[in-house]
Amino acid sequence: MRAEKSRASDQRAADHRSPHEELCPDGAVIEAKKGISICDNLLENDIEIEHACEKSCACTTCHVVVREGFDSLDPSEEKEDDLLDKAWGLEPNSRLSCQAIVKDSDLTIEIPKYTINMVKEIK
C-alpha cells in the first residue's frame, strides 16, 4: 500500500493512496486521524490490513514499510523490533502498523505483498 503526501488538516494527518493487489487493487485515498495507529486508520477506511494478534504487538501481520514520514513516528520499542526481525520483506523503515501512531506529518506507506500468517480469516 502506498500513500502519497497531501495537505493535512488540524484533525487529520495525511491522505493515503493505497495500491495493493488484494487489499485495495484500485488504490484508495484516506485521511489519517492523528493520535491513532496506522493500522486503525486503515481499518477505519475499509482497508482490511491483517492484524492476527488483534493489535497487541504479538505478530507481524500488520507490517508496513514507511516510505515517507518515518522520522515523524515515535521510535519503535524493543518488543516491536524483535517481532519485526521475523517479518517478511523487512526494511530499515519497517514498522508494525498497530504500534505506529500517526502524528502531524504526512506519511507514505506500503503494505508488503506477503505476511508470515499461516492462517488467514476470510470474510
Image: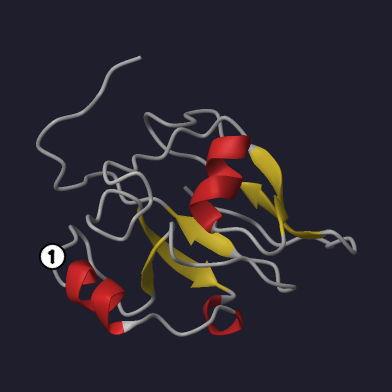
Q: Quadrant of the C terminus?
A: top left
Task: Tell me if 4 is positioned left or right of 113 in this view.
Answer: right
Q: Residue at x 47, y 47 (%)?
A: 1
Q: Is residue 30 above or below residue 56?
A: above
- Say few, some or many: other residues with alpha carbon within 10 Å of mark 1 (under 14 / 14 to 19 / 20 or more): few
Q: What residue do we see at 63% from left, 66% from top?
A: 102
Report x, y in % for residue 4.
Answer: 65, 57
Tell me which amino acid carries mark 1. Answer: Lys
Give the colouring mode of the picture: secondary structure
**x and y percent of residue 108 in the render?**
57, 62
Q: Quadrant of residue 12?
A: bottom right
Q: Which residue is labeled 1 in the image?
A: 86
In the image: residue 66, left or right of residue 106? left
Residue farthest top in this picture: 123
**What secondary structure is found at the residue carrying circle 1?**
loop
- x, y percent for residue 22: 37, 29
- Identified at 49% across, 67% down, the residue is 100
Q: Is residue 105 left or right of residue 3?
A: right
